[in-house]
Amino acid sequence: MLNIVLFGPPGAGKGTQSQRLVDKYGLIHLSTGDVFRKNIKGETELGVLAKSYMDKGQLVPDDVTIDLLKSEVLKYDNPKGFIFDGFPRTNAQAQALDDFLAEINSSIVQMISLDVEEGELKLRLANRAKESGRVDDANPEVIQKRINVYRAETAPVKDFYAEQNKWMMVDGVGSIEDITERLFKAIDSLK
Ligand code: ADP
């Protein structure tokens, strides 16, 4: 399986680019943020719980998120591979993902980081708030909190993959098409 972790701070463009990678490589896009938002819309128990964290810019607890991720992966028969977007966000999640994939005789092939500086991220999130109606994008304090959580808890996950020689960085600034081309090149180089 071609399992890729698409990594980067909030607003880096993971969702946008994931869609393009799905189209090109026939992978399954698995975004924990999207799954949480679906649950919030459907007013499920998980949604109520997730919302209480997301509204504050905090991470949903690892045990909840890990269980969710596993059940999402197991929904698919014979997948070509997954693009994990927004997961893993902590070292505990990364370890759990490795263990779980090993159980199903699979593994992560590569983590690809989209590199975007903070000023640009804030602009993008403010714009997205106008279009998507995401409450966590509308409030500058919540945005700042998410960026802080990213720096403290999520950015270090990069080292987890770098230590396994499974990490690369792609410039995440430029036109959407240009960034897609860079990602295609990066992924083609893995094969
Ligand atoms: P973004 O990458 O723009 O921050 P996401 O849609 O990936 O947005 O995530 C939105 C929110 O959902 C996060 O701020 C967090 O509260 C929650 N969330 C998503 N994925 C995870 C995860 N792997 N672990 C914990 N919380 C998560």
Image (tube, rainbow, N blue to C red):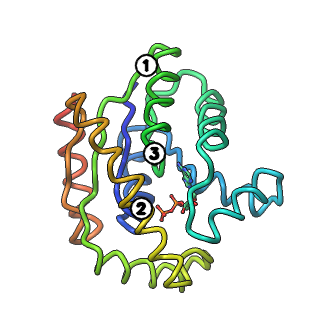
* Residue 97 placement, left or right of 51: left
- Pointer 2: what residue? 16
Q: CA distance from mark 2 to mark 1?
A: 26 Å
Of circles 2 and 1, the one toward us is 1
Q: Is mark 3 within 8 Å of ligand 1?
A: yes
Kindly state the secondary structure of the residue where label 1 is placed: loop
Q: Nearer the viewer, residue 57 or 37?
A: 57
Kindly state the secondary structure of the residue where label 3 is placed: loop
Asked if residue 36 is positioned above or below residue 57 in the image, the reply reads above
Numbered circles on residues, count: 3
- Residue at 29 percent of width and 78 percent of height: 120
Ligand 1 placement by image quarter: bottom right
User: Residue 10's image quarter?
Assistant: bottom left
Of circles 3 and 1, the one toward us is 3
- Pointer 1: what residue? 106
Count neighbours of disc 2 (C-alpha within 10 A) and say few if under 14, some if 14 to 19, many if 20 or more: few
- Residue at 48 percent of width and 72 percent of height: 145
- Residue at 70 percent of width and 63 percent of height: 51
Count neighbours of disc 3 (C-alpha within 10 A) and say few if under 14, some if 14 to 19, many if 20 or more: many
Image quadrant occupied by the N terminus: top left
Kindly state the secondary structure of the residue where label 2 is placed: helix
Q: Position of residue 172 (x, y in %)?
A: 24, 63
* Residue 76 placement, left or right of 42: left
Asked if residue 62 is positioned above or below residue 175 in the image, the reply reads above
Of the numbered discs 3 and 1, the one sitting upstream in the chain is 3
Of the numbered discs 2 and 1, the one sitting upstream in the chain is 2
Q: Position of residue 50 (x, y in %)?
A: 69, 57
- Pointer 3: what residue? 90
